[in-house]
């Protein structure tokens, strides 16, 4: 039997994590398989031959994408041509739907099996994308159980695999140990501030988060704060902003966001993937987000869900407060944090629900994804 050839493309660090685990699981089933496409260090470490730097695809924001569009379109056209002229047995696109879905559409029309790993946020916006996904994708691997219902209209072949992060984060851990690791006392009452890793988030959220912390600290001077910076550049930006709050007991640390969250008694956090990490740590939290007024006007008109944060989407209720744009102001966030810290009923409800979410997602995602792909390959062989 000829060895399996798998083309696979991931567009950013989170996709590289998924891709690395998936390649490892597929290699256990097909030891001689060949993997090539685009990926990061983790996928390359598992044997991927990367045909281009993954950083080329890691572009966020409307205007940033436009600036890189000619390069991205040229790369995508070349990849499609190469894959069709020398067909893999299977193509796997990991997230990056704006880049991968058009590749999947072209390859599926050429008779190549296609898998898309991570559902686009069709529940939030661009719901009509489900029809394109149906045309382009033979198998959709989803991280969350609620996603299946949004594809009912197309009868999309879907396999819910769970989220790999749920395996990496233990359900039981020592909060006191994490506090001491960051230099706090074991009995300190700590609020973690996570305004996000992007420059726009530093601009719009960090000042609001620091002001909220100041208001809260004035009412509850026993509180201590920790703020993890995603990288050295963000660290320096945030350090400058913190000069406006010389008395605020906030510890700025480099990276270590999971340690900061694990140590915290409550979290003020930007809406995004970090909220899932906070949820898996079962941390009471307040979610906030601000962006440029024009960008918000565009996105808010596209939004078609009641909730924007993953904890609420997974819980199916307004489990954690969400404060967006004008509502993400220091006075409102201070009040919400106060409730999250000292309203015992709210805390207990959040913690219990978040622990249920962890159990729901704590599945062998890499193995389940690989098994679903094996079934897809076998079904094709059986139909030939």
Image: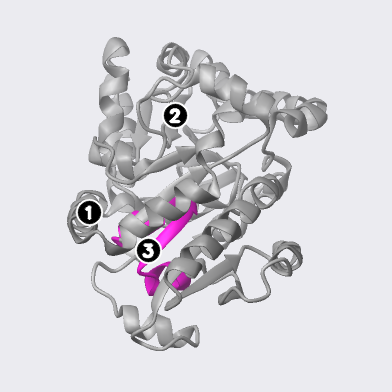
Horizontal side of residue 167 vs 296, given as left or right: left
Q: Is residue 212 above or below residue 302?
A: below
Query: Callout 2: helix, strand or loop?
Result: loop
Q: Quadrant of residue 164?
A: bottom left
Q: In this view, does 145 lie above or below 34?
A: above
Q: In front: mark 2 or mark 3?
A: 3
Q: In front: mark 2 or mark 1?
A: 1
Q: Which numbered tag is attached to residue 121?
A: 2
| Residue at 31% from the left image edge and 30% from the top image edge | 147
Q: How crowded is mark 3: few (under 14 residues within 10 Å), some or many (20 or more)?
A: many
The picture places residue 336, in percent across and down from the top left corner, at 38, 51
The picture places residue 36, in percent across and down from the top left corner, at 59, 45
Q: In which quarter of the image is the C terminus?
A: top left
Q: In which quarter of the image is the N terminus?
A: top left
Along the line of sight, which residue is nearer the eye, 157 or 86?
157
**Mark 1 or mark 3, earlier in chain:** 3
Q: Which numbered tag is attached to residue 346?
A: 1
Residue 135 appears in the picture as rendered: yes
Tell me the magenta residue range: 258-282
| Residue at 31% from the left image edge and 36% from the top image edge | 313
- Would you name the residue on which mark 3 appears? 266
Along the line of sight, which residue is nearer the eye, 308 or 62?
308
Horizontal side of residue 224 vs 96, given as left or right: left
Query: Callout 1: helix, strand or loop?
Result: helix
Task: State yes or no: residue 245 in magenta.
Answer: no
Query: Callout 3: helix, strand or loop?
Result: strand
User: Do callouts 2 and 1 mark residues in contact (Cβ within 8 Å)?
Assistant: no
């Amino acid at each position: 039997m000829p060895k399996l050839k798998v083309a696979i493309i991931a567009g950013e660090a989170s996709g590289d994590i998924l891709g690395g685990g998936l390649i490892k699981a597929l290699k256990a089933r097909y030891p001689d398989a060949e993997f090539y496409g685009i990926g990061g260090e983790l996928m390359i470490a598992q044997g991927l031959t990367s045909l281009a730097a993954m950083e080329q695809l890691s572009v966020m924001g409307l205007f940033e994408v436009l600036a890189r569009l000619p390069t991205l379109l040229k790369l995508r056209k070349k990849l499609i041509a190469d894959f069709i002229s020398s067909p893999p047995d299977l193509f796997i696109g990991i997230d990056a739907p704006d880049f991968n879905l058009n590749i999947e559409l072209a390859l599926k029309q050429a008779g190549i099996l296609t898998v898309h790993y991570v559902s686009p946020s069709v529940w939030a916006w661009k719901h009509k994308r489900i029809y394109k996904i149906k045309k382009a994708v033979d198998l959709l691997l989803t991280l969350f159980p609620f996603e299946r219902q949004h594809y009912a209209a197309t009868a999309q072949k879907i396999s819910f695999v769970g989220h790999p992060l749920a395996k990496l984060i233990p359900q039981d851990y020592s909060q006191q140990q994490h506090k001491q690791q960051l230099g706090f006392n074991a009995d300190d009452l700590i609020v973690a501030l996570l305004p996000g890793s992007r420059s726009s988030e530093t601009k719009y959220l960090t000042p609001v988060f620091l002001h909220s912390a100041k208001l809260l600290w004035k009412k509850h001077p026993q509180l201590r704060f920790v703020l993890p910076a995603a990288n050295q550049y963000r660290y320096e930006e945030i350090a400058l902003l913190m000069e406006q709050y010389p008395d605020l007991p906030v510890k700025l640390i480099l990276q270590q966001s999971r340690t900061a969250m694990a140590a915290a008694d409550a979290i003020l956090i930007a809406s995004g993937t970090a909220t899932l990490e906070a949820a898996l740590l079962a941390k009471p939290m307040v979610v906030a987000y601000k962006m440029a007024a024009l960008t918000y006007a565009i996105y808010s008109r596209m939004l078609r869900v009641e909730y924007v944060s993953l904890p609420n989407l997974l819980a199916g209720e307004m489990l954690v407060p969400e404060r967006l744009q004008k509502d993400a102001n220091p006075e409102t966030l201070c009040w919400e944090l106060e409730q999250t810290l000292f309203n015992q009923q709210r805390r207990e409800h959040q913690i219990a629900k978040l622990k249920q979410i962890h159990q729901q997602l704590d599945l062998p995602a890499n193995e389940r994804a690989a098994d679903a792909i094996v079934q897809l390959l076998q079904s094709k062989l059986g139909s030939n």
